Amino acid sequence: MLLRALDEAVVSQGLPGRRVLVACSAGVDSTVLFHALHALARRRSLGLALGHVHHGLRGEEADRDEAAVCELAAKHGVPVAVTRVDVRALRSGRSSRERPTVQEAARQARYAALATQARELGADCIATAHTRDDQAETVLLRVLRGAGPDALGGIPERSPDGRIVRPLLGVGRGEIVEYARATGLSWREDGSNASRAYARNRLRHDWLPGLEREFNPRLLRAVADLAEAVRRDADWIEALVAAEADRWTEPEGSTLRIAIEPWAAMPEALARRVVRLVLRRAGGGRDVSRRHLLRVLTYLRTARADTYLQLPGGLGLAREREAFRLGTACTPRGSC
C-alpha cells in the first residue's frame, strides 16, 4: 500500500531518473521514506543520497541520531552529508518582533543546510518525509491561530521551483509505522516530540484523540483531503490573479507603477488577492498583515493625488496624478 502510493508520487512529482537527497532525521517517517525510495530506486532510476542536519539542541541524543543516519547510509551504500548548525545564533541579537521561534530558526537552518548538501552531492531535489498527518496538523494549527483561505492549502507536494518534494504527503502515520515494523526497520524517537511546550504536540497528543474518538475517526484524512482541494483551487485562482496583476501593474525603475482605474469596480476577493501579490512582488510579503492589506486596498480606492501610505519593510505607496507607485524609494512627500 505505502510503496504503491509512494511510487505514484514519485512519478507525479517527476522524480524518475533524478538524483534525490533524502532529508533524514533518523525518525520513523524519514527512515521509511529512504527505505521505500531505495526499494523503488532501480525501477524508477533514482539516485539516492542521505542528508542529516544536527541542530545542536538535544545534546547526546542528537549525536546518536546523526550516527544512526550515517549507519543507514553505510548499510545501503549511499553517500551521506551531515551539517551541524547553530540555531541559537539565528535568534540572538534580534528584537522580539523579528526573532524567530526555536522551531522557525531550526527550519530555516535545516533547509539552508539541505540545499547546500544537495549541491555538494549533485542532487536535483530534496525529499522530505512530511505525511498526511503532518498536513492535517498544519492546517488545523493555522485554523486555530487564525488564517485566511489560502492557508488551508497546507503543505504543497513540492516547492514552486521543484527543489523540495514531499512524496509521502498522501500517506498516513499509521501506514508509516506499519511499513517500518513489517520490514524490520529500526529508528530513533525524538524526545522533544512528547513535549507539551509545542502547540503541534499538544494538538497531536491532547486534542486530536478526543476529536477522532468523539467526532470523526478519519478526521486527519478529511482535513488533508480539504487541504488538497484548496490547493488545487488555489493553483487555478493564482494564475488568474497573476494575469490581473500583470494587467494593472508594471515595473518602472525601482518601483511598481499601479493603475488607478480598476480598484473601485474590482470584486473584493479578487482585489485582495491582487493586492497581496503586488505587495509580495515589491518585497513586502511576510511583513504585510491582513490589516496592512486592507489599508492598502482602501487607499487604492480612495486616495487623493500627492498622498502617501507607509508600509512595513520600508515600502511606501504614493498616489501621483496618473498612477500609484509602490517601492522602497517612495517617500512621505510623494516622490518615488
Image (tube, rainbow, N blue to C red):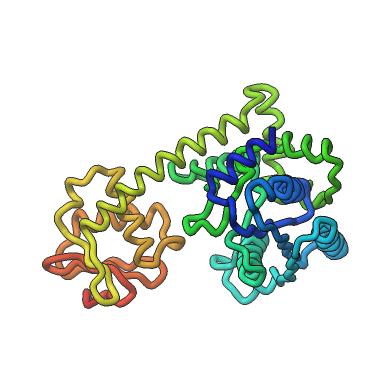
Q: Quadrant of residue 85?
A: bottom right
Measured as percent of width and height from the top left, residue 229 is found at 47, 35
Query: Can residue 195 be seen at all in this image of the molecule?
Result: no
Measured as percent of width and height from the top left, residue 23 is found at 69, 57
On screen, residue 220 above or below 243: above
Measured as percent of width and height from the top left, residue 21 is found at 66, 60
Question: Which of the two residues, 297 or 253, is positioned nearer the viewer here?
Answer: 253
Residue 264 appears left or right of 161: left
How many labels sit on residues?
A: 0
Measured as percent of width and height from the top left, residue 277 is found at 35, 56
Residue 37 appears left or right of 225: right
Question: Which of the two residues, 247 or 285, is positioned nearer the viewer here?
Answer: 247
Q: Quadrant of the N terminus?
A: top right
Residue 332 appears left or right of 277: left
Residue ID at (51%, 55%): 159
Residue ID at (53%, 51%): 158
On screen, residue 146 above or below 109: above
On screen, residue 12 above or below 216: below
Query: Can residue 24 be seen at all in this image of the molecule?
Result: yes
Residue ID at (23%, 65%): 250
Question: Which of the two residues, 334 or 105, is positioned nearer the viewer here?
Answer: 105
Q: Quadrant of the C terminus?
A: bottom left
